[in-house]
Structure formats: C-alpha cells, structure tokens
Image: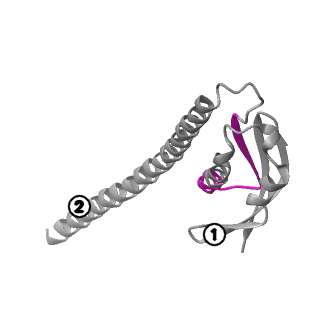
Amino acid sequence: MGQIKSIHFKYLISIISGIIIGIIIGAFIIITLVSYRVDQYYEEIQKLTISIEEKNERLKKLELSINSQKLILKDIQIILINEEDEIDKITIEKYAENKYHKLLGREVETIDADIIEEIIDKRIFKISNKEYHLQVTKIFLTDILKIWIKTELIQ
C-alpha cells in the first residue's frame, strides 16, 4: 500500500514539473515573438518620424523660396552602401540629412558640389559601441540632391 502511494506521488510530481516546464518554455517563446514585433514597430515609428520631420523642413524651405523662379534645391536623398543594421542605417541617414538641411531652398547654381562632398566624406560616425567610416562615392545635384555614401564598420 505504501508503495502504491509512492508511485502515485512520483507520477503527480512528474506531471506537475512537466506542466511548469511547459509554461516556462511557452512564456519564453511568446516573449521572444512579442519582442521581435516590438522591434519592427520601433523601426517603423522611427522611419515615419524622420519622414515627417523631413517633409516639414522641406515645406518651410519651399515656402520661403516660392517667389523665386530659379532652380531651387527641394529635396535631399541619402543612399547608403554596405549597411546591414536597419537602426544604424536610419541613424546615419538622419545624421547626414541634418548636415545638408541648410542647403534646402537654396539655388542650385550657388551650391558647390566639392563642398557638399567635404561635409561628410572621410568622417567617422559613432553609434553606441560601433564606429562607421563614411565615404562619399557619388553626388547628383539637380533640384534633388542625391548623395551615395559608403559605410564601413571599423573593428
């Protein structure tokens, strides 16, 4: 009789421990999936915030220069080459666009392409524990300034 109670007690303990382990593993999986989705939403919110700031800045500059009939710089586009991490890419693009925002609304004829290149070329940009070497590879200047920047992670 004592042995039967012992066997039932062992089965009860194994069932309870199985349930507890299952709950822990399930909670870990759910937390992992939720954190992945939160990271995706965070990146999307950052992109949208940057887009709104850009458009507001562009609108202000265009409103100031609307009376002028000359070719005016209306937009700045930064194209990054060799960038894997999406958050770092967004941060570097924002940094580069902030460096060139003073050019918005200016006449294209008065902008010197060599000076545009010197603003970002051969700079080292630090993000948290990473350092990136920025190098301008190509510039295209019309009413839209397009700059191709090669980024290299410094080890």
Q: Name the residue under label 1.
A: 130
- Closer to viewer: mark 2 or mark 1: 1
Classify mark 2: residues with Cα within 10 Å, few (<14), some (14-19) or many (20+): few
Q: Residue 123 is drawn in which quadrant?
A: bottom right
Residue 83 belongs to the span the image colors magenta:
yes
- The figure's colour scheme reads one colour
Point out residue 149 in the picture as x, y percentages from the top left corner. Answer: 78, 54
Point out residue 35 in the picture as x, y percentages from the top left corner. Answer: 45, 52
Indicate left or right for 62 with 52 as reference. right
Classify mark 1: residues with Cα within 10 Å, few (<14), some (14-19) or many (20+): few
> What residue is at 59 percent from the left and 53 percent from the top?
87
- State the SS at label 1: strand
> What residue is at 67 percent from the left and 69 percent from the top?
131
From this view, report whether residue 11 is shown above or below residue 64: below
Q: Which mark is residue 8?
A: none
Residue 38 belongs to the span the image colors magenta:
no
Magenta range: 74-92
Furthest residue toward bottom: 155
From this view, report whether residue 76 is shown above or below residue 154: above
Q: Nearer the viewer, residue 116 or 139?
A: 116
Q: Name the residue under label 2.
A: 12
> Label 1 near label 2: C-beta < 8 Å?
no
**Label 2 or label 1, whichever comes before in sequence order:** 2
Indicate left or right for 124 with 42 as reference. right
Q: What residue type is labelled 2?
A: Leu
Point out residue 30 in the picture as x, y percentages from the top left corner. Answer: 41, 50
